Image (cartoon, rainbow, N blue to C red):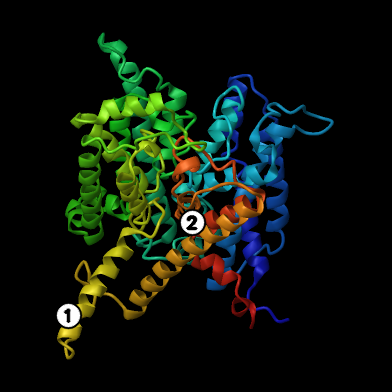
Amino acid sequence: MNLRVEYRASLSLVGTVVRYLSVPLLAPLVVSLYYGESVAPFVVTILVALVAGTALNRLDPDPDMGAREGFLMVAVTWLAVGLVGAIPYLVEAHGVPGIVAAPHPQSTLANPVNALFEAMSGFTTTGATVLGDISFQTHSRGIMLWRQLSQWLGGMGIVVLAVAILPELSVGGAQLMDAEAPGPGIEKLTPRIAETARVLWGVYAGLTALEIVLLYGLHVAGPLLGMPELAPNMTLYNAVAHGLTTMPTGGFSPEARSIEAFSAAVQWVIVPFMVAAGVNFALFWGVITGQPGKMLRDVEFRAYFGVLGVLTAILTALLFGGTFVSAVPEGQSTFDAAYLAMVSGELTGSLEPSLRHAVFQTVALVTTTGYASIDFNTWAPAAQFVLLFAMFIGGSAGSTGGGIKVIRWVVIIKSLRRELFTTAHPDAVRPVRLNGRALDERGVRGIFAFTLLYIVLVFVSAVLLFLDSLRVETTFTVLEVFSAAATTLGNVGPGFGIIGPMGGYLAFSDVSTLFMVFLMWIGRLEIIPVLVCLTPEYWRR
């Protein structure tokens, strides 16, 4: 059959990205050397990345990039980095037969399906995990750092990073960046698209470094000033780990109880960085270049903060009033009666902790970061419903947040208001405007189509997950499978019940786990680029 897509060109550029993936693998390798741990997981992965990347790169030494090739390259790149990213987990669990013994054979990532899930969850910044035991007794510090680093690499976009640093991708960079963020997406900030990619990554890296400094500064400030420690367990390793997973809105933490394991001061410091991660990064460039008013005038920016404020106020009132479950859910709880009594006593009638946890969880779920300052499984259905609603909002376009995105909801609301107006005034012509500019009607229809497709996919996926649970005779509630579908497609991370903030996805069958890998993959690319590549019309001349 005559193919319309130059797939060799796409795979050649995939090979370029895979080959250069060996560079960031050096960081966890150095950490493993420092702590005297096995470096085999990273040495093996570096060799695989170099060999596989070089082989793919030779398919087309001088690739010609068109729009179709861009879609294929981006879709395959994200799948390829997930596959390569799983190798360190498998080597840690199995070793290299006949050469290196397994450093941590008890790891739940010995199952290749689980390893792929963890890797895809990292690169897509979902933050869902199948680690049965999050500790340095079961996993090395190098492996745990690789989890955090994979999220940081995926946050601003693997392809955006490649466009920024690899000359061979700069020619078709605009098409690649559009394919990686196909919605109302990345604004061209400079005359050359490669410079725009470098600006975005520069802002991203700068905010990451600032957070690391502040978090570790909390740890050392108390003793230096002769005061009680503000963050006793926020070591340099933990500061780096959480800096690498906040700005990409990832949520992987080396602590089993996420941010609950740290002091209130740490939680307050992390909040503004989660908020920043959900803002369109192009607006930060406006601030840097002396145009701060552009950020304040932006419709999406104002809507984003409005949503955060309203949801925070509702949750604060609910927590302050003592909105908690009355009993421990039997058989599927991640907390016990003592914990329930503790959080209820801490929050009920206390403004600061109620406000802090309301702010933290609202921001964490709206931006799809997925951190947890508390086990919100302890909250009553009214408060959990607010969090479920937050999962469907998402961050801003051009941010590292997942979900539907605030800008799409703004356009939908404006379109509905226009429909009501034109129904009352049939002769009126009233375009949908954003920041003073009229939107193309095709773009408006595309936003409605994407949002409908997203919601339908969540419901269909929840049904499929529930049916598979019946097949393997595993008991999941409707809320658990629905939140699993919503959090993997939206790259959120924690759900409710057994997959709550202190739980994990280990109970799902291999079939369901692979299906959720697919959801994370298409969700990170906003569905369309992957589904387009799966249609016959895309391939036919």
Res 2 visible = yes
Q: Are marks 1 and 2 in contact (CB under 8 Å)?
A: no
- Compared to 413, does 515 lie above or below? above
For label 2, the SS is: helix
Q: Nearer the viewer, residue 136 or 207?
A: 136
Q: Nearer the viewer, residue 146 or 416?
A: 416
Nearer-N-terminus badge (1/2): 1
Q: What is the count of numbered marks? A: 2
Which residue is rendered at x = 17% and y = 54% of the image? 293
Which residue is rendered at x = 25% and y = 68% of the image? 413
Considering every residue shown, the one lying at the far right of the view is 98
Res 261 visible = no
Which residue is rendered at x = 42% and y = 60% of the image? 193
Residue 424, x across and y down, in percent = 15, 84
Residue 228, x across and y down, in percent = 28, 12
Direction from residue 312 to residue 70 in the image, left or right:
right
Which image quarter: residue 66? Answer: bottom right
Labelled disc at residue 387: none
Considering every residue shown, the one lying at the far top of the view is 226
Direction from residue 455 to residue 93 in the image, left or right:
right
- Crowd around label 1: few <14 · some 14–19 · many ≥20 (10 Å): some
For label 1, the SS is: helix
The N terminus, quarter of image: bottom right
Q: Nearer the viewer, residue 182 or 187?
A: 182
Mark 1 vs mark 2, CA separation in Å: 34 Å
Instruction: State the residue position of label 1.
Output: 421
Instruction: State the residue position of label 2.
Output: 489
Q: Amino acid at mark 1?
A: Phe
Q: Amino acid at mark 2?
A: Leu
Direction from residue 390 to residue 97 in the image, left or right:
right
Residue 117, x across and y down, in percent = 60, 46
Residue 506, x across and y down, in percent = 59, 41
